[in-house]
Amino acid sequence: MADASALAVTSAVAPAVRLAGLVYDYPDGRRALDGVDLSIAAGESTALVGPNGAGKSTLLLHLNGLLPGRDGLFRRRPPSVWIDGLDASRHGAEVRRKVGLVFQDPDDQLFSTTVLEDVAFGPLNLGAAKAEARRLALECLERVGLADAADRPPRHLSFGERKRVCLAGVLACEPSVLVLDEPTANLDPRGRRRFLELIGSLPATKLIATHDLEMVLEICPRTVVLDAGKIVADGPSRAVLDDAALLEAHGLERPLSLLVGR
Amino acid sequence: MPSDRPWRLDARVKLAGAVGFVLAVVLAPPGSWRYLGVLALALAAAVVASGVSIPRLLARWLGFLVLVGFLAALAAGRVAESSGLSWRLAALDLVLRNGLALMAMTAMAQVTPWTEMLWAMRRLGMPPALAATLGFMYRYLFVLHDELTRMTVARRARSFGRRGLGFGALASLIGVLLGRALDREERVFAAMTARGWDGVPRTLDD
Amino acid sequence: MHIPDVLLSGGAAAATAAVGAAGLAHALRRVDRRHGPRTTSLMGMTAAFVFAAQMVNFPVGPGVSGHLLGGVLAAVLLGPWAGAVVIAAVLIVQCFLFQDGGVTALGANFVNMGLVGAVGGYAVYEPIRRALGGRRGILIGSMVAAWFSVLLAAGAFSIELGAGGRREDFLRILSWMALVHAVIGVGEALITGLVVRFVLTTRPELIEGPGAVEVEAEPSPGWASPVVAGLAVALAVAVFAAPFAASSPDGLEFVGEKFGFLPDEEAPPLVASPMAGYEAPLGDLGRVKKLATAAAGLIGTLTVFGFAWGMARVFAAGDVKREALVDAV
């Protein structure tokens, strides 16, 4: 916790992501997030780890204003999420523009009939002209190495390729904060390696929810542990992930690379 | 941008051509055999030129023949009365004309991928909201079909050689699929909203 | 059953296309007002679901299988107009991709299955659900509505197919369509009921929605409204169901006349009406027979209605073991 506040103070401008006392209940009344405080500086790469059901995905959905308040179920609460200093509950559109969310299952995110249409979806909705959206989409497909798949339907791509198209679709919105939910889940080793290199090469502020602790060691200097809707640890990844007692208490295991020596 | 994609212009021509052909068949007065013969020749020429598989075309026609025959038998009385044909010729006329229309649509569908057809429909005046829904539906049709297949295999694997699944099991399969489909819709809608979706379909074309 | 091209008269095709287009435009507006930006994903996904669900074949007998049609199911889940839009999407894909249903009959097919089937089915469902209340109301309502939606769609189909022809031709079409679809309707009611029961047991929130608690708490408005609604529809159905219900439809006679090479100059109907045997010109006696036919039709319809109702109640009564259902996952 001390680390988090220190980081917040050192950045002169508003932190890229700030959560203060974030509370959220599932529609059935169970508590999902129980007072989360978190501050992420611009350009920082942070991992969000914790057991299944800890509230990771719910937390991510809050970052671009998707929760709470869908279906008109608004509940009046004091603001608790800020992106670049903007209150997410009041500046939904701008916040969504700043935060790019990559979902776990690419089929949840690739809803257009062709790859190019899908990547251009964000820019078109954010007001880009058609020619500009096309150019941007092709450029982002190039960045993820799938320019030649532009006219194919998403279902003809492999899982790893679909995952990269999702990333391209989010990058095309030019977000300053990139939020990834289980980016390496279900990827084969080569697909995982390729996706990690891709993520690592992006300059945006990153928050990555994952069970892949090896990946965390590789690309996230900082790790936050979430359990039962609360942050239970926050610090440099190597320190947090080497704390066997802490990890075991929260359903995690020390990554192999730390066990066999660094 | 039809200029850099000649096949897209084609999709409109193909769609309008097929529907126009069907209209020509439908509007033909019953018993105008010579006219139908000309149309059949035109269709045959188009089929040969486009390289559509003729056996598949005939198979599709035969597949619908029982249903069409039954309905033609029911409707023949009306046609016979208005045209002066005998009821048998009227029924034959209905079956033949339906065959021509069906094969024209089948040939068109075989050489026009759905994404192009959808694009053509939009350009030919389909409301964008409906076109967007159809595109979305087609996209998730395969996802749901795969899920259904996986569930069926899982069920079979646990039924240990007993005969096919019963009514209850099949219905519960559909019920599970429904739950998964609506859960997925929630996630997809979140993903769409995250990328600025406001309910207005926007595409790269036109 | 999807109407193929050519079988409708030009007038019927044009009229149903106009009605269908207007109905679809209205349905799209209503859905958009209710679901806003969510319309596309909700309608698209539900249409994909209905399409996929239609691929599940239910064994009926050797070589015969049936499948869900889904209009009432969609309407129960999302409301009548959304149900119509979903059916429209399914019909368009079936027409253009699989040639199931003619492109010039698209309007008629949408009128039958979307407007009459889903919206009309919902009109049967809603009063029953409200009167019975709770999950029993949802289950029984959806099953009865499913049966009616199929039969009403068949009735609309008959009108379209027979439009412009003689009355006898129309009655023959009606009686055959009603006969076939009364049976198909039982299958639809059964499958719809099983699916709805499963969803109510495992994922009730999908059907009951956020307003469900209030609905349950409301005092039920009594039995008057469903009985009236039910009887009204039953009577409407009886009018066209009469011919089939009255005669024991003679399959052999039908086949014989179809393949029997009757003399052409007599221009006999290719398919004899199942009530043909009752059409003897017997003067007063004939009129009595016609009355008896109508009465028998009414009784027949009510019997099937009662059967569907009873079946639904049996369904509702049996408490499903969760275990068995979770097994399906």
Image (cartoon, rainbow, N blue to C red):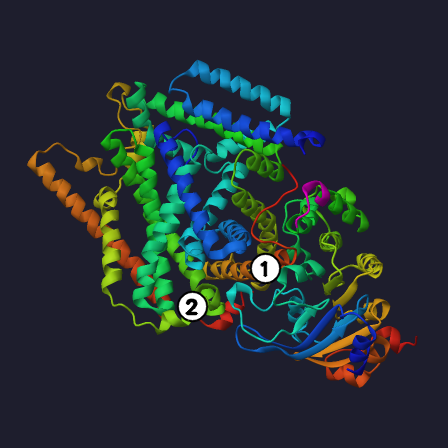
Q: Nearer the viewer, residue C174 or A48?
A: A48
Can marks 1 and 2 be said to lie on one chain?
no
Position of A61 with respect to C85 (left or right) is right
Question: Which residue type carries mark 1?
Answer: Arg
* Residue drawn 70% across the image and 32% down it: B5
Residue B184's label in the rendered image is 1
Check disc 2 and report its element: helix, strand or loop: loop
Residue drawn at the location 63% of the way across and 29% of the way down: B9
Element at badge 1?
A: helix
Residue C235 falls left or right of residue A262: left
Residue B169 against residue A81 in the figure, above or below? above
Q: Quadrant of residue B93?
A: top left
Q: Is residue A136 above or below residue C17?
A: below
Q: Residue furthest front?
A: A12
Tell which of B167 and B125 is nearer to you: B125
Indicate the quadrant containing the C terminus of chain B: top left, top right, bottom left or bottom right: top right
Q: How many other residues sit within 10 Å of disc 1, few (<14), some (14-19) or many (≥20)?
A: many
Q: Is residue C244 magenta?
A: no
Q: Is residue A132 magenta?
A: yes
User: Dividing the image into 4 quarters, which one contains the N terminus of chain B?
Assistant: top right
Q: Nearer the viewer, mark 1 or mark 2?
A: 2
Q: Nearer the viewer, residue A235 or C103?
A: A235
The percent coordinates of residue B83 (x first, y second) are 32, 19
Q: Is residue A59 left or right of residue C54?
A: right
Expressed as whole percent of the image width and height from the top left, the position of residue B133 reads 54, 47
Q: Which residue is identified by label 2?
A: C211
Residue C63, visible in the rendered structure = no
Q: What subunit carries mark 2? A: C
Taking the spot 51% from the left edge, 52% from the top edge, the residue there is: C43
Q: Which residues are magenta?
A: A127-133
